[in-house]
Amino acid sequence: MAGLFQKILIANRGEIALRIQRACREMGIPTVAVHSTADAQAMHVRLADESVCIGPPQARDSYLHTAAILSAAIVTGADAIHPGYGFLSENAEFADMVEAHGLTFIGPSPDHIRMMGNKIAAKAAMASLGVPLVPGSDGEVLSLDSAREIAAEIGYPVLIKAAAGGGGRGMKVARTAGDLEEAWGTARAESRAAFGNDAVYMEKYLDRPRHIELQVLADTHGNVVHFGERDCSLQRRHQKLLEEAGSPVINEAQRAALGATVTSGLAQLGYRNAGTLEFLYQDGQFAFIEMNTRLQVEHPVTEMVCSVDLVREQIRIAAGEPLGYTQSDVRFTGHAIECRINAEDPETFMPTPGMVTAFHAPGGLGVRVDSALYAGYKVPPYYDSMVAKLIVHAPTRMEAIARLRRSLAEFAIVGIKTTLPLHQRIVEDPQFQAGDYTIHWLERFVSGQ
Ligand code: ADP
């Protein structure tokens, strides 16, 4: 693998920085870690070959500081940058800057990032490729009056969504015509505040869908392969908490059909590197909602069932290597489940930064823990609250659930509250065990209804 890149700068922190470091190390590629002053003692810095402090704690002054990151890459002689997820991973201007300086951005082309970053443009592109969409407005909705007309056409409830949306922000439901004005106003205000852009569009609000997404890889030689679906229906406030591969409700034929539509569409687009298409699935129908042009938090469940290292593949693709396999070489074995463990109170979901006084990760057959925690580490208050991912893999879903139950029981994170107890409750729930849930299930589960 030597020769792909001289050195890769990892423009991220936490578990994902470690995850990327691990892939690079196995490929024999040296890495550069970057960190804020708050992260000087972080695991991704302690384990790095080299590290550069890029600024103060606030993300906008460090992990989002494009000039500081690019300078760090140039000074250390890195020839590629892996952005991970979040931060700059879907920032087309940053990808442009990286390429303008003669470095490789490990990800899709800036144009594709830009296209999919605007959900209106993404939906238009997917519609033209024959991918089914959630019924809704044809593009941006420019006025409250036209929002009223569209809602009357598609029928309430409707969802007003930010074109620039992400992380569930800028999204408001109007259950009836009486709710529309308020939903319209808040979605736009939230979107303006979060993204500096108040363009919105509308969708029919589906009452009992599952969130099902498809993982793809595309090389620069025209090969596109999918790695099946992930079911990410367990969400709170539109944020995923637990993910499975495959979905308990999708069969092989459905997977193959969706995969064929998506891979041929992406081949036509000339898409490259990793990507995920997100769908809502209800009454046997898939409807596209958005595409993420990056590695996702939940990628490990796919890695477990497909025996693929997606980060390694991203790096190979960015270096211009062909995939070297076709769709029929991709095998799906067993079932995998991931729990996102957040430094949050499991009842109120308030963030709980602070000192981890003891840490013991579960192990054994089919258990994977992706975390940057260690005993004596102080979780800083400045960043995302996710501190660990527990991933289990077993031959069947029921065995995976049994493995998850015993792994959760072994897992000890002491000193701060985490969402571990919530996951322990979820695995015991008969409906979860039956795979019988929609995107609304968890919200009701946590509120005890
Ligand atoms: P974001 O980019 O903010 O994450 P998405 O468009 O990916 O926004 O939607 C996030 C989540 O919101 C979905 O996984 C789903 O739970 C919910 N959602 C989005 N669109 C709809 C819809 N039309 N009907 C019902 N729920 C939706």
Image: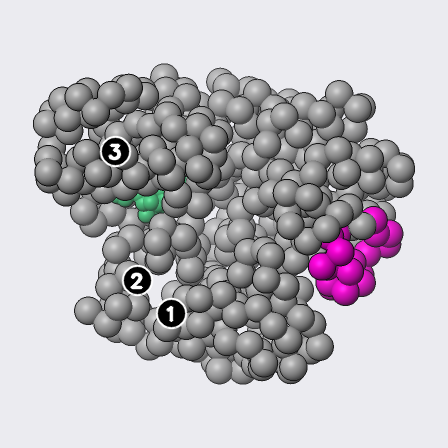
Q: Amino acid at mark 2?
A: Leu
What is the spatial separation of the Cα atoms under label 2 and label 3, in whole angstroms? 26 Å
What scheme was used to colour the molecule? Answer: one colour
Q: Residues within 10 Å of mark 3 (few under 14, many from 20)?
A: many
Residue 42 painted magenta: yes
The residue wearing badge 1 is: 348
Q: Is residue 441 above or below residue 202?
A: below
User: Which sits in the foreground, 235 or 308?
Assistant: 235
User: Which sits in the foreground, 293 or 354?
Assistant: 354
Q: Is residue 284 visible?
A: no
The residue wearing badge 3 is: 184
Q: Nearer the viewer, mark 2 or mark 3?
A: 3
Give residue 106's position: percent from left, percent from top: 68, 35
Q: Amino acid at mark 1?
A: Thr
What is the spatial separation of the Cα atoms under label 1 and label 2, in whole angstroms? 14 Å
Image quadrant holding the N terminus, namely top right
The verdict on label 2 being within 8 Å of ligand 1 is no
Q: Is residue 191 visible?
A: yes
The residue wearing badge 2 is: 442
Give residue 116's position: percent from left, percent from top: 47, 28
